[in-house]
């Protein structure tokens, strides 16, 4: 199967804007699309040059000296050479970029005082040790539905560890909606504070697992405050 150049005349008028690399392996394989399921339609041999057009996930779109456009996996691209003879550097998300991440977001699932809870969160890391985040949670119990939002500060003392513990404190608002049928109860909205501990586990590329335990104090209008324990685990991504 032959793949025609995508308007090669337009490409070659400005090919100086694209990076050229030389094949160092015996050959590289050009696929018809960005995935191993796409067939190989062309081979570029050692010593020839290809020009990189763009990247999509782990695949690079290149054009051969004969004007064949195709997709090459990054495992083969990282073995090519720059014009100065140095290896072409592939910018892969790795543990170093995980340590120096700026933003993260994820979904956590677990138990909040006996009710199933789901949490969505987004966080900003202003240093490798300290971060701030917003969490929005929904808990579904047998007698009530609970929604709460928290602003948290997290401290991660060992960010370079693959299994990296953290501590957190935060405060927020909780709204409880009872499911009574005989008597119409009133919804309650209260303030809450909490402290917790957790663990981040770097998996690969842009993903990590996050698990945590939190102890909440709900500041009610009654004489006694409510104490609630929570645990949850989930997946997160970083940017």
Image (cartoon, grey):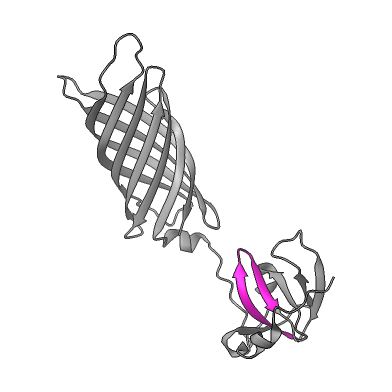
Horizontal and vertical percent for residue 62? 68, 77
Which of the two residues, 52 or 217, is positioned nearer the viewer here?
A: 52
Q: Outermost residue, top direction?
A: 182
How many callouts does the rendering have? 0
Secondary structure mostly seen in magenta is strand
Q: Is residue 134 left or right of residue 239?
A: left
Q: Quadrant of residue 168?
A: top left
Magenta span includes 55: yes
Magenta span includes 112: no
Rendered residue at 60%/84% (across/down): 18
| Image vertical order of residue 197 relative to residue 164, above or below | above
Horizontal and vertical percent for residue 28? 76, 75
Rendered residue at 60%/89% (across/down): 14
Q: Is residue 44 left or right of residue 113?
A: right
* Residue 183 visible to an observer of this rendering: yes
Which of the two residues, 143 or 133, is positioned nearer the viewer here?
A: 143
For the C terminus, which image quadrant? Answer: bottom left
Rendered residue at 59%/72% (across/down): 90
Numbered range of the magenta stretch: 48-62
């Amino acid at each position: 199967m032959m793949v025609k150049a995508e308007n090669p005349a337009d490409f070659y008028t400005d090919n100086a804007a694209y990076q050229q690399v030389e094949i160092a392996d015996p050959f590289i394989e050009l696929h018809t699309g960005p995935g191993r399921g796409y067939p190989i339609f062309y081979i570029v041999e050692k010593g020839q040059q290809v020009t990189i057009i763009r990247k999509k996930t782990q695949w690079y779109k290149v054009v051969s000296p004969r004007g064949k456009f195709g997709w090459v996996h990054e495992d083969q691209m990282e073995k090519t050479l720059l014009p100065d003879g140095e290896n072409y550097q592939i910018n892969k998300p790795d543990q170093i970029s995980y340590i120096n991440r700026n933003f993260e977001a994820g979904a956590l699932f677990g138990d909040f005082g006996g009710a199933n809870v789901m949490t969505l969160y987004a966080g900003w890391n202003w240093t490798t040790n300290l971060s701030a985040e917003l969490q929005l949670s929904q808990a579904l119990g047998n007698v009530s539905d609970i929604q709460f939002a928290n602003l948290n500060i997290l401290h991660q003392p060992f960010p370079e560890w693959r299994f990296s513990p953290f501590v957190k404190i935060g405060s927020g608002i909780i709204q409880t909606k009872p499911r009574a049928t005989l008597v119409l109860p009133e919804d309650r909205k209260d303030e809450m504070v909490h402290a917790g501990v957790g663990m981040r586990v770097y998996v690969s590329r842009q993903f990590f697992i996050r698990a945590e335990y939190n102890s909440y104090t709900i500041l009610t209008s009654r004489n006694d405050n409510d104490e609630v324990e929570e645990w949850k685990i989930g997946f997160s991504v970083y940017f």
